[in-house]
Image (cartoon, grey):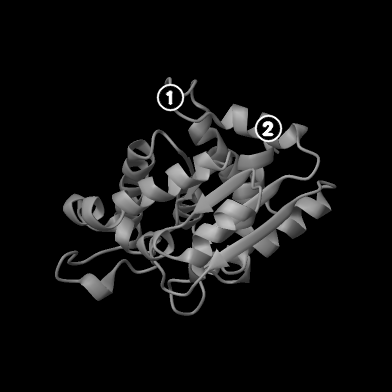
Amino acid sequence: MGAAMKTSLLLSVGFLLTGAAPAGEDSQDALQARLRKTEEPRILFVGNSYSFKVPGALARLAKEAKRKVIVEGVTKGGWTLQKHAGSEETLARIRGGKWDVVVLQEQSQLPAFNREQRNRKMIPPAQALVAEIRKMGAVPVFFQTWGRRDGDHRNAEAFPKDTFEKMQHRLVIGYREAAAAAEGALVVPVGEAWAREMKEGTGKRLFAKDGSHPSAAGVNFSAEVFKNFFFGE
């Protein structure tokens, strides 16, 4: 891994380490302490195609770092958190896995929509899933994804002349609001790490040809952000 990428990853993790979490909110320090003292931490990813290969990459990176960890996923192409919240399969996996961490990843465009749409389509299922995760004794975290390489051109009427940077800014706001509404859950700032790579001119390699999904490099980069966030390396 190059020096620029390492710097970007460290900055990403440091983003949520600037001061103690307010009362009632989750703490990254507490999460890392829990994972350190657990012999074989169990992590579940709940999401869609953006998360298809990240669990496997995270497990591989942890193994290379001599860490025991179990990482699994319940991921369906195109699914929203609303679909997962209404899925007996997803709820059964959350309830039956004795997880330490459950990662929630929303459909790639929805968190970047306007607040009224987020309040209707994202916030309620996010709150429901977080409540279920906490009830089972696990720590919920949100997987902040990345903007599309050329912006959200499928919604050009709502976002004329959109760009990666503009979409990423909206995603950051959307995930922060969802996390705050879900009793102060943590956000893993993967998208912000991608944004730093884009700013440095090396980010386009993270995208697959469709300009949306992650390439192999994008999967590995995202998994590195998670490893650093969870284990403080």
Q: Position of residue 191 (x, y in %)?
A: 46, 53
The residue wearing badge 2 is 34
At x 44%, y 45%, the residue is: 130
| Sequence-wise first label, 1 or 2 | 1
The residue wearing badge 1 is 24
Q: Against 123, is 79 above or below?
A: below
Marks 1/2: CA–CA distance: 17 Å
Side of 86 where 30 appears, left or right: right
Q: Quadrant of residue 147?
A: bottom left
Res 14 seen here? yes
At x 41%, y 73%, the residue is: 78
Instruction: For the residues labelled 1 and 2, say whether their Cβ atoms are less than 8 Å apart.
Output: no
Q: Against 76, is 26 above or below?
A: above
Q: Quadrant of residue 176?
A: top left
Q: Against 32, is 62 above or below?
A: below
Q: Position of residue 94 (x, y in %)?
A: 56, 54
Q: Against 110, is 132 above or below?
A: above
Res 204 seen here? no
Three-letter amino acid code of the residue under disc 2? Arg
Closest to the observer, 88 or 178? 88
At x 47%, y 46%, the residue is: 132
Q: Position of residue 141 (x, y in %)?
A: 51, 44
